Image (cartoon, grey):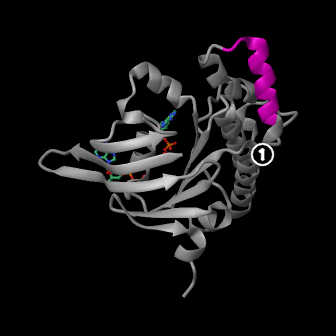
Amino acid sequence: MIKFKNVYKKYKLDKSILTAVNDVNFEVDDGEIYGIIGYSGAGKSTLVRILDGLEAPTSGSIEINGKDISKLSNKSLREQRKKIGMIFQHFNLLWSRTIIENVELPLEISGINKAERRKQAEEFIKLVGLEGRENDYPSELSGGQKQRVGIARALANKPEILISDEATSALDPQTTDEILDLLLKINKELNLTVLLITHEMHAIRKVAKKVAVMEEGKIVEHGDVYDIFQNP
Ligand code: ADP
Ligand code: ADP
């Protein structure tokens, strides 16, 4: 379970303080697809960086399975970060590496030997539907296929949580639906907790069970997607 409790993130600007995350509280159950929706500047990316341990909160606690990640040592935090996979709007693939080499990258960093990481990478490439494209380069793939590589790479270390940070925002509607279907499949087959960060209501409606609406650093509403987005 993920639990944000009274989380604040304040940035010191020249002459003022900007509160990017303002008293955020929410909980995500294991195996759930949880959406966070909000306009640009709402604080979503800051929340993600805090959850991924890239930034410490100014105050408050972020528990993952009962452990407050803001209190971990650097070594424990590195271990914790392996349990989180991330996918991005612009895929963040390495263009000079083949598809399989991209997927192997996190396994290489984890110190897994070549034979084993090749085997695991092949397994995830198959899961995302890119079997046969292992030795192609990212530039040879469509946007949707590039995001499939991103997903395979995010899964390589067998994380407990997958964070999708605007992962469909650069894709056309049909490709968006294909990627969302893939996220649903992965959530089911791997029992993975998925945090879906987006400004697209459609994405939330299609896959998320619960949603938090962010505005100016605050969660202004949260609950079941059906209740929150019910048309009047
Ligand atoms: P979103 O992801 O919803 O677009 P962000 O989390 O990127 O929102 O940003 C929330 C607010 O915090 C914005 O006003 C942004 O300018 C500000 N912000 C984000 N990161 C920093 C930073 N490192 N320093 C100063 N301000 C920041
Ligand atoms: P954009 O909104 O421009 O698509 P991204 O979500 O792609 O932004 O991330 C912006 C940058 O932050 C990227 O260049 C990426 O390399 C870096 N980044 C943020 N979080 C992580 C992470 N957990 N692992 C690797 N890179 C990260």
Q: Nearer the viewer, residue 134 or 186?
A: 186
Which residue extends farthest right? 132
State yes or no: Cβ of the residue under disc 1 lies below 8 Å from any atom of ligand 2.
no
The residue that appears at 15% across and 44% down in the rendered structure is 14
For residue 228, above or below residue 21:
below
In the displayed structure, does residue 29 sit left or right of residue 107?
left
- Left or right? Give the position of 2 relative to 116: left
- Residue under the point 56% across and 28% down: 82
| Observer able to see residue 135 | no
Q: Is residue 173 magenta?
A: no
Considering the whole magenta stretch, tell me its main secondary structure. helix
Q: Residue furthest front?
A: 66
In this orientation, which residue lies closer to the viewer: 82 or 93? 82
- Counting from the top left corner in percent of width and height, residue 193 is at 62, 47
Q: Mark 1: few, some, or many residues within 10 Å (few <14, many ≥20)?
A: few
Rendered-image quadrant of the C terminus: bottom right
Q: Position of residue 50 (x, y in %)?
A: 40, 41
Q: Position of residue 137 (x, y in %)?
A: 74, 30
Disc 1: which residue: 189
Magenta residues?
Answer: 112-125
User: For the residue marked with disc 1, what is the amino acid?
Assistant: Glu
